[in-house]
Image (cartoon, rainbow, N blue to C red):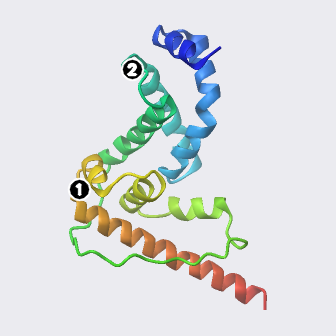
Amino acid sequence: MGLEKLIQKCKKQDIKAQEELYRLYAQRLFGVCLKYSTNYQQAEDNLQDGFLTIFKKISQYQDKGSFEGWMKRIIINTALQKYRKEKYLDIINEDLLEEQEIEIDEEDLSVDFLLKLIQELPPRYREVFNLYALDGYSHKEISGLLNISQGSSKSNLARARGILKERIENHQNNNSVRSL
C-alpha cells in the first residue's frame, strides 16, 4: 500500500493502517526519542505518546512537505512538552561562550556511547544540543520552542558542548592509560 493511501486510511481511524504506519516508522522515530530522553524506557514512553498524537492529529497533515518530517516534529514536541512540565534550572547568564572544538578518535567511541553521553546531559542542555546540533533548529526556533531567550539557547548549547568535550576527553584519556 502506498504512503498516500496509508495516510488516508489513518485519517479514517483505520486500526490496521495505523499499525502499518507504526511498523514503518517506529524504529526511525525511536532514534529521535532516544536523543530527547534520559533512558530507554523514557524513549519508549515518548514514542508511544508521540504516535498517539500523530494518530490524533493526522487529519491536520495537508500532504505538503515530508510526512516523516511532520511526524518527527510531533515526536520532538511531545518529548519537549513532558520536559516543560518539569522544573529546570534555567541559565540566566547570556554571555556567549566560545564554541568548543572536540577532537574525536572515532575508533574509540561508539554511537551508543555518544548517545549515552548526550542522554546524561542536564535536561535543558540536552534539549538545546539535540535541537540545534542534531535536528538543525536555529536559536530563534529553539527559543520559541523552549520559551527561553536566544542568548540562553546559545549559552546552553555552549555549555552542553563543553560538558561533552570534557567527557569525551576523559574517556579517551582513560582508554589511552589502559592501553599502556
Q: Residue at x 61, y 19 (%)?
A: 19
Q: Which residue lies furthest to the front in this view?
A: 64
Give neighbour class at mark 1: few <14, some 14-19, many 20+ (Cα, 10 Å).
some
Is label 2 or label 1 in front? 2
The residue that disc 1 covers is 148
Residue 68 in percent (x, y) is at 51, 32
Image mark for residue 86: none
Task: Left or right? Give the position of 39 relative to 121.
Answer: right
Amino acid under disc 1: Ile
The residue that disc 2 covers is 62
Q: Residue at x 45, y 37 (%)?
A: 75
Mark 2–mark 1 contact, CB under 8 Å?
no
Is residue 89 visible from the viewing direction of this image?
no
- Towards the viewer: 60 or 165: 60
Q: Which element carries disc 2, helix, strand or loop?
A: loop
Q: Which residue is drawn at 68% across and 64% down?
A: 110
In whole angstroms, how far apart are the C-alphas of marks 2 and 1?
30 Å
